[in-house]
Amino acid sequence: RKEVEQDPGPFNVPEGATVAFNCTYSNSASQSFFWYRQDCRKEPKLLMSVYSSGNEDGRFTAQLNRASQYISLLIRDSKLSDSATYLCVVVGGSYIPTFGRGTSLIVHP
Amino acid sequence: ETGVTQSPTHLIKTRGQQVTLRCSSQSGHNTVSWYQQALGQGPQFIFQYYREEENGRGNFPPRFSGLQFPNYSSELNVNALELDDSALYLCASSAATGGFEDTQYFGPGTRLTVL
């Protein structure tokens, strides 16, 4: 089993839709969790950190489920500009970050 | 823009050659990490440097080595290039005192092609 797994997609949704991605991790000692966004042929950029209590930033909500070892990202009211690849990052007990392969989101008019 | 710069942007090498990639960190950042991103994959952590010392290493062979300079710029060196080394190489700087708790700011990457 891979350390960090994501459904590569693509998720193809209309503008205004709500879409959710999950990311599972295998190391129960993992310490920190993040979502990064990567546009085509660009560098990754931090979207949000994921806190144990869950956190929200505008249309984006991130949650952590330690019991089931996954993190999630919910995007409400999708915009065309949300089209990108979303990478989850898990920092394990050795403090090494592991990226998932990314989930591709395509928002169409 | 993140303020992290990398050079060169593209590079073509042949198998067996050596390559040096460069990264200039964002001002005020003393930690730099290097990643390899193959096509269709997420970035894979190579190593991190903090205050000129290696501070964590991923599952990469010793022919991948690095340096961090007093001005916090950094180099990634790869010896004996293999075809599978073809990838986008990303560096990321942060203000974290080693570790990954702080936001990492990525540079635009160097695309290496090994023929």
Image: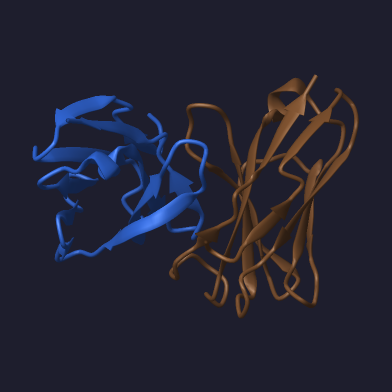
Chain colours: A blue, B brown
Residue furthest out toward the right: B17
Tell me the quarter of the picture where residue A103 sits.
top left
Residue at coordinates 18% horizontally, 55% vertically from top-left? A60
Is residue A91 among what the camera can see?
A: no
Is B46 drawn above or below residue B39 in the view shown?
below
**Percent x, y for residue A64?**
19, 54
Question: On the rendered image, what quadrant is the N terminus of chain A found in?
Answer: top left
Tell me the quarter of the picture where residue B19 sits.
top right
Is A5 drawn above or below residue A33 in the view shown?
above
**Percent x, y for residue B24?**
71, 64
Question: On the rendered image, what quadrant is the C terminus of chain A found in?
Answer: top left
Q: Which of A80 and A30 is in front in this view?
A: A80
Give the side of residue B75 with respect to residue A68, left or right: right
Is A52 drawn above or below residue B14 in the view shown?
below
Q: Nearer the viewer, residue B9 or B52?
A: B9
Give the side of residue B38 with respect to residue A55, left or right: right
Give the side of residue A8 with respect to residue B68, left or right: left
Residue furthest out toward the bottom: B28
Q: Which of A54 and A103 is in front in this view?
A: A103
Residue at coordinates 35% horizontally, 61% vertically from top-left? A32
Residue at coordinates 44% horizontally, 66% vertically from top-left? B103
**Percent x, y for residue B26?**
61, 70
Is residue B101 among what the camera can see?
A: yes
**Percent x, y for residue A73?**
20, 47
